[in-house]
Amino acid sequence: MENNLTDKTYRAGGYLRLSIEDENKDNESVSIKNQRAIIDEYASNNNIEIYDYYVDDGYSGGNFDRPAFKRLINDIEMGIINCVITKDMSRLGREFIETGNYIYKYFPEHNVRYIAILENYDTLFPNGSEDIIPFKAVINDMYLIDISRKVKSVRHDMMKKGEFVSGSVPYGYKRSLENSKTLVIDEYAASVVKRIFNLKDMGKTCGMIAKVLTNEGILPPDVYKGKKLKQITISTNLWCEKTVTRIIKNEAYTGTLIQGKYERVSLKSKKKRLLPKSKWIVCKGALPQIISEDIFKRVNSTFNNNESIRYRQYDYLLKGLVVCGECGKTMLVRRVKKQSEPTAITPIYVCRTYARYRNNVCSMHYYREDALNEIVLREVRNILVKYANNTSLENKYKSSISNSDILKDYEVSLKKYQTKIVTIDKAISDLYKDRVSNIISIDEFSNIKKELEKERQICVKEINNLEIGVNKSKAMVNDEKATMKIINDFLKMKNPTKEILKELISKIEIHEDKTVKIFFNFRLNEEVHE
């Protein structure tokens, strides 16, 4: 009888994981090969089809950011597999909270059977072993914490010995071929570092140095080291002021290796925090010297005196909305003196890319701030007056009323299906009671239950569609009302604020031929577009 009630075909994903810590134990029992053999034997003995194996070799159980595990979850979401098998629960994960979330929430919600073979745990056949699972999860979590502390202690010992254990090698150095924890000088990059310090010592600013290096065709650090970049832009091969500043401030070039500046806020978080200087691990003479301490101190002293001045920030009316029509970068505001009146200052919008790099990257085009304000405010007001005086606002009002009516219809239907699901759930519950009391046969139970579940699935599907409709209708009603309010507020204002302009305008493009293009945050009708 039990087989009839649980008669279901299972397509399983065998999940295998081996961390670096497990490998270091040289323990064959946790090897990928051994895990696969155990799962193969179990599936064969229990008539379970293995759809695929998902292998994370060399990944910690402390988090679930693992490629094979993500693929397994994707296959669950796609309905490809409905069962997950691991050799034991620690292979799934060692982190208590997330592991418990998958076992007790995610898998049941997605109708996925989970089996941990060595714990004799199977969600389809509860046998009392599930009572001990939370305790095992806590033990696995404690093991993870213990391993983390040991790894951290070993890393700190290596840092104190002057070994390089950080991820990113400073520009000017490279890893030794004999020992990856030892850095040696990269002669070409080191010559560029010396050049940077010499130029700074001669009184050049970091921005000037960046332009000199770019003009000479010297590749910036990330490009030179072949680092995989998220996005290639027009400025990828150009030096920037921040890169030069970072090099000048780096004590590594004097031979001093500083590590352990940051620590994770907790074992279960990837976020890091900066530690006080007293806790940094400093090893003098751990690196081959590129720059003498005298030059380093002199250059940084000059840097601090001349370049740490903070200038007043001006909050211009259109600042942040104005972009270059050629390169797409936000334009910055420069304050320039008038030749006719040396005491008068004129703010102008200039292309950020050209101002920073020159070198034929984009072009030198600009616009006076006061003239641009006048043009934009006049044109926006003219467009919105025309927009407000035609039938668009009336149509929007009618559309808003119509959407409100549709929203009410959606909500009534939604409530009806939600009530129906409650009724079906009660009917299924009563059905089980009738079966236990032998009021109905197994066949009658199965047939009625199947029909009820089918009807319930139809209701769930309808509810999902209605909820989408409700959300869309609400968004449309809110958007239409908000747009009308913003337009009317703008037209009433003599001097519109920066905030209301940001509500109306998405961006303002300035092109090389001084063409100004205004883009709105909402769609205007065809007449206004023309």
Image (spheres, rainbow, N blue to C red):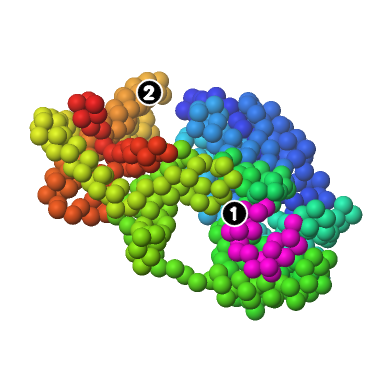
Q: Residues within 10 Å of mark 2 (few under 14, many from 20)?
A: few
Residue shown at the point (29%, 33%) measured from the top left: 468
Q: Is residue 398 magenta-colored? A: no
Q: What amino acid does circle 1 point to? A: Cys
From the viewer's perspective, is 208 left or right of 58?
left
Q: Is residue 49 left or right of residue 350?
A: right
Camera sees residue 459: no
Q: Secondary structure at mark 1?
A: loop
Q: Quadrant of the C terminus?
A: top left
Above or below — where is 10 with respect to 161?
above
> Dot 2 corresponds to which residue?
450
Q: Position of residue 300 (x, y in %)?
A: 65, 72
Residue at figure coordinates x 43%, y 50% from the top left: 350
Q: Position of residue 302 (x, y in %)?
A: 62, 74
Q: Which of the 4 image quarters holds residue 148? A: bottom right
Quick check: 461 above or below 145?
Answer: above
Q: Which residue is mark 1?
A: 240
Percent of width and height locating residue 244: 64, 60
64 to 268, vertically: above or below: above
Q: Which residues are magenta?
A: 192-213
Q: Is residue 211 magenta?
A: yes
